[in-house]
Image (spheres, rainbow, N blue to C red):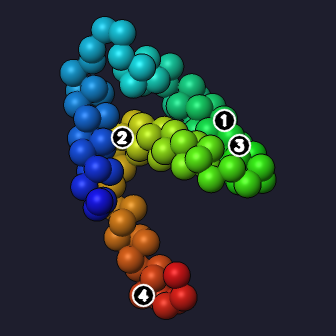
Amino acid sequence: MSLEVLKELYEVVSDRRRNPVEGSYTCRLFEEGLDGILKKVGEEAVELILAGKNGDKEEVVYEAADLIYHMIVLLVYGNVGLEEVMRELERRRGKRGDH
């Protein structure tokens, strides 16, 4: 398993933004605009926090996947490339060396 799945997901979400598909959940999020996307990111973050608090590993995995998906929708909406985020993580790692 690699980070390729994140790149693939980013590409699929980007394609949905460029080429809307009727009935697509991703397209519906884009139609709701920034406020709707931010609301979903917030909801998913809270659900992940609660899953972590409950100590349920399967629920944490499920909610983390939901949060990552909605984060990618936000990135695409804001024209932020996944590579930009990865570069920032690399920069932080090199800067502190403790990640």
Is disc 2 surrounded by few (<14), some (14 to 19) or many (20+) residues within 10 Å? Answer: many
Q: Tag 3: residue type?
A: Val
Chain-order first, disc 3 or disc 4: 3
Task: Evaluate whether residue 45 shows in this view.
Answer: no
Q: Tag 1: residue type?
A: Glu
Secondary structure found at label 1: helix
Is disc 3 surrounded by few (<14), some (14 to 19) or many (20+) residues within 10 Å? Answer: some
Residue at mark 3: 46
Which of the pair 17/5 is nearer the observer?
A: 5
* Eye-nearest disc, 4 or 1: 1
Task: Give the percent coordinates (x, y) of residue 67.
Answer: 54, 43
* Eye-nearest disc, 3 or 2: 3
Q: Which quadrant of the view contains residue 16?
A: top left
- Tell me what residue is drawn at x 36 percent, y 16 percent: 24
Disc 1 from disc 3: Cα separation: 5 Å
Residue at mark 4: 94
- Tell me what residue is drawn at x 30 percent, y 43 percent: 10
Q: Are marks 1 and 3 in contact (CB under 8 Å)?
A: yes
Residue at mark 2: 76
Task: Evaluate whether residue 72 shows in this view.
Answer: yes
Task: Give the percent coordinates (x, y) of residue 48.
Answer: 65, 46
Q: Which quadrant of the view contains residue 45?
A: top right
Disc 3 from disc 2: Cα separation: 22 Å
Secondary structure found at label 3: helix
